[in-house]
C-alpha cells in the first residue's frame, strides 16, 4: 500500500537542518534561508551535475555588482516570509538514483559552497577558480570527515529510508511525489 504524499524538497531541507545541527563545519547554515528546489535532468550519461548552489548575493555579500559599466542585482527570493540567501537545486531523477552516501556527498558539496559568513556569497577558495579552488577532488576532502560522521548518525534515523530510495522507488512508494520548482534566478540590470 502506497503512502499518500512526499515533498522531496521538504525532506532534503529537513536533512540540511540535521547537517547544520550535527556538523560544526556547517553550523553557520540557516536552513530557513536556503531554498531547496528540484530541476530536471533526464540524461543517463555518466558524470554530470547532481546539484547546484545559486548564491543570491555577490562577492562579500554585496547586493549589487558593477560589471562592464552596468549595475546588476539578484532578484529577491522570499519563501515562508523569509528572504533567502541561497537556492540549491537537485537534479531529478539523476540525484535520486545515487546511493545514500553519494546523495549526502552531493548535499555536503553544495552546502560547503556556502560562505562561512552566510551572506549570500559563495565560499571563495582562490582568486581564480574561486568556487572549487584548484581541484574539485581536494574541495570534497574539506568535508569528508564530517560526511562520514554524519552518515553514521543519519543511518540510524528514518531519513535513511528516504535516502535509500531511488526515483522509481519513490514513485512506487507514494501516491503523490512533489517538489518545489523555481526558474533559476539570474542577475538583472538595475535601472
Image: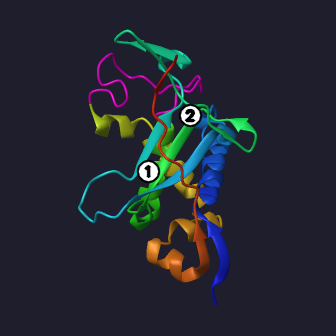
**In the rendered image of this protein, does residue 59 appear above or below residue 74?**
above
Q: Based on the displayed image, in which of its 4 quarters is residue 78 positioned?
A: top right
Front residue of this view, candidates 129 and 155: 129
The crowd level at tag 1 (other Cα within 10 Å; few <14, some 14-19, many 20+) is: some
Mark 2 and 1 residues: CB-CB less than 8 Å, in contact?
no
Q: Which residue is drawn at 43% across and 44% down?
A: 52
Determine whether, in the image, residue 39 is placed left or right of residue 127. right
Q: Residue at x 35, y 24 (%)?
A: 130
Question: For the view shown, which residue lies furthest in the top direction?
Answer: 69
Taking depth in this image into account, of 53 and 15 the one nearest to the observer is 53
Q: Earlier in the sequence, mark 2 or mark 1?
A: 2
Residue ID at (66%, 37%): 30
Q: Which mark is residue 105?
A: 1
Q: Position of residue 127 (x, y in %)?
A: 33, 16
Q: Is residue 124 part of the magenta span, yes or no?
A: yes
Q: Which residue is labeled 2 in the image?
A: 25
Q: Position of residue 117 (x, y in %)?
A: 59, 22
Prevailing secondary structure class for the magenta stretch in the rendered image: loop
**What number of labels is visible?**
2
Write down the region rendered in magenta: 113-134
Looking at the image, residue 14 lies above or below residue 42: above
Q: Looking at the image, which residue sits at the far right?
A: 81
> In screen coordinates, is 22 left or right of 57?
right
Eyeballing the image, is 76 above or below 148? above
- Check the picture and name the quadrant holding the N terminus: bottom right
* Residue in the picture at 37% in, 29% down: 131
Classify mark 1: helix, strand or loop: helix
Farthest front residue? 191
- Say left or right for 98 vs 10: left
- Residue 12 vertical placement versus 33 (above, below): below
Amino acid at each position: 500500500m502506497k503512502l499518500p504524499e512526499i515533498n522531496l524538497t521538504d525532506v532534503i531541507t529537513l536533512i540540511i537542518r540535521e547537517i547544520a545541527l550535527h556538523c560544526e563545519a556547517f553550523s553557520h547554515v540557516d536552513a530557513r534561508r536556503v531554498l531547496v528546489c528540484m530541476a530536471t535532468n533526464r540524461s543517463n550519461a555518466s558524470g554530470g551535475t547532481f546539484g547546484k548552489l545559486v548564491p543570491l548575493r555577490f562577492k562579500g555579500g554585496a547586493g549589487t555588482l558593477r560589471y562592464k559599466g552596468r549595475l546588476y542585482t539578484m532578484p529577491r527570493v522570499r519563501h515562508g516570509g523569509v528572504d533567502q540567501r541561497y537556492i540549491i537545486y537537485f537534479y531529478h531523477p539523476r540525484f535520486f538514483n545515487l546511493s545514500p552516501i553519494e546523495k549526502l556527498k552531493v548535499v555536503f558539496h553544495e552546502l560547503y559552497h556556502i560562505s562561512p559568513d552566510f551572506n549570500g556569497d559563495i565560499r571563495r577558495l582562490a582568486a581564480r577558480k574561486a568556487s572549487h579552488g584548484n581541484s574539485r577532488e581536494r574541495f570534497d576532502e574539506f568535508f569528508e570527515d564530517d560526511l562520514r560522521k554524519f552518515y553514521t548518525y543519519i543511518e540510524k534515523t528514518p531519513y535513511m529510508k528516504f535516502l535509500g530510495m531511488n526515483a522509481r522507488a519513490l514513485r512506487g512508494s507514494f501516491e503523490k511525489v512533489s517538489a518545489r520548482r523555481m526558474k533559476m534566478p539570474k542577475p538583472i540590470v538595475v535601472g
